[in-house]
Image (tube, rainbow, N blue to C red):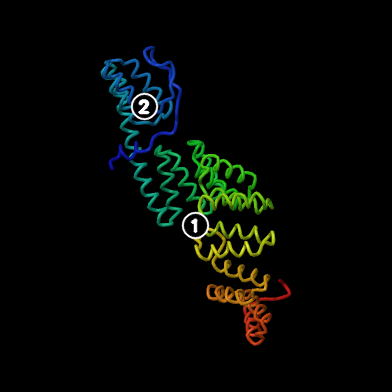
Amino acid sequence: MNFLQKLFGKSNPANVQIKQTESEQEEATLDIKILLERAKKKLSNKNFEGALFDINKALEIEPTNFAAFLDRSRVKREANDILGADEDYETGLVLMKKKERGLKALDKARDKYNANDFIGAIKYYSEAIECTIEFEFVFYDRAMSKKYAGDYDGALLDFNKAIDVDSNYSDAFYERARLKHHQLKDYNGAMHDYNAAINLNPTDAKCFEYRGVLKNELNDKDGAANDFSKALELNPARGETYFSMASIKFHNRNFQGGIKDLDKVIKIGLVGDSSYSMYNAYFFRGSYKSILKDFEGAIEDFSSAIELEPHKGEVYFERGEARLALGQNDLAAEDKINAIKLGYKEEEN
């Protein structure tokens, strides 16, 4: 893909109301690409004034658009404004070379990002932006890099810029919501952004899931349950959402329902982008089986949890309790000793 194809492969999101010539409609909403194409048609008809009008409108939208300067140079040259044509041509070339440097920097930034070198990625994304590569996805990508590098305030500013460029950018609202939710602890702001992301993309399961997580943290259990249900309706193959739903059911003392949700978690698995773990799935399922006096099932789950995390005292203690309930006194004593060796203190739990 050559430079021009790379640059214009993505349409500019900006729109502008343009006053047309008498032979056209009085007003229409146009973007830069349409304006420049229309200017070329006017130039072919020797309508220099009309062509310049459209190109100038394009430059009002994007003052650093090198193609607009080159097109205006051509119009001025055919209209015998040689000095103006030369000035626009030089400006267009300077801007084009700057764009080329920016696109090369953008390629380097993505390579750094994919290699988890987020500091390096930030450097090259910044270089691309300085070279007028100011699409919404560039600000978004730099925001993600800053987030992973621990610069949360910087990430927030870049998410804001991405949304300023494209107010319909649902992923930017979603990621800004997560930043506000988990890192900045701005719960009202996070709720606003989750709502905005859902309004823009009502079929995105993860937006409902994480809004549900926030509602759960704010003790809106019914609202959280509704969001988790909607998330599962949209994506029934995500273990994290079943885990979240299980926590609501356990809160409501619906242990059987919670166990069924954890069955799904264990069957589907987890993708690793949350605080949940398969150890937790087995441990919690075993704990609630113990509450329901299914001690054999509990022991089986605790044993699976120990295979995953053999250095957690809590799970040995709980397996010991289940074994004690079944009269397996020697095995229970062995588990209690292991729990103590691993630092578990019964009086603190």
What is the C-alpha distance between the residues marked 2 and 1? 43 Å
In the displayed structure, 171 sits above or below 254; it is above
In the displayed structure, 125 sits above or below 257; it is above
Asked which quadrant contains residue 6, the reply is top left
Q: Amino acid at mark 1?
A: Ala
Which x, y percent locates residue 279? 56, 69
Q: Amino acid at mark 2?
A: Ile
Q: Which residue is mark 2?
A: 34
Q: Which residue is mark 1?
A: 237
Q: Secondary structure at mark 1?
A: loop
**Is 220 placed left or right of 228 in the picture?**
right
Q: Secondary structure at mark 2?
A: helix
**Is 38 placed left or right of 189 in the picture?**
left
Q: Nearer the viewer, residue 346 or 108?
A: 346
Instruction: Name which of mark 2 and mark 1 comes first in the sequence.
Output: 2
Q: Nearer the viewer, residue 153 or 184?
A: 184
Which x, y percent locates residue 310? 56, 76
Which x, y percent locates residue 163? 51, 39
Residue 15 is tagged as none
Residue displayed at 61% across by 51% down: 212
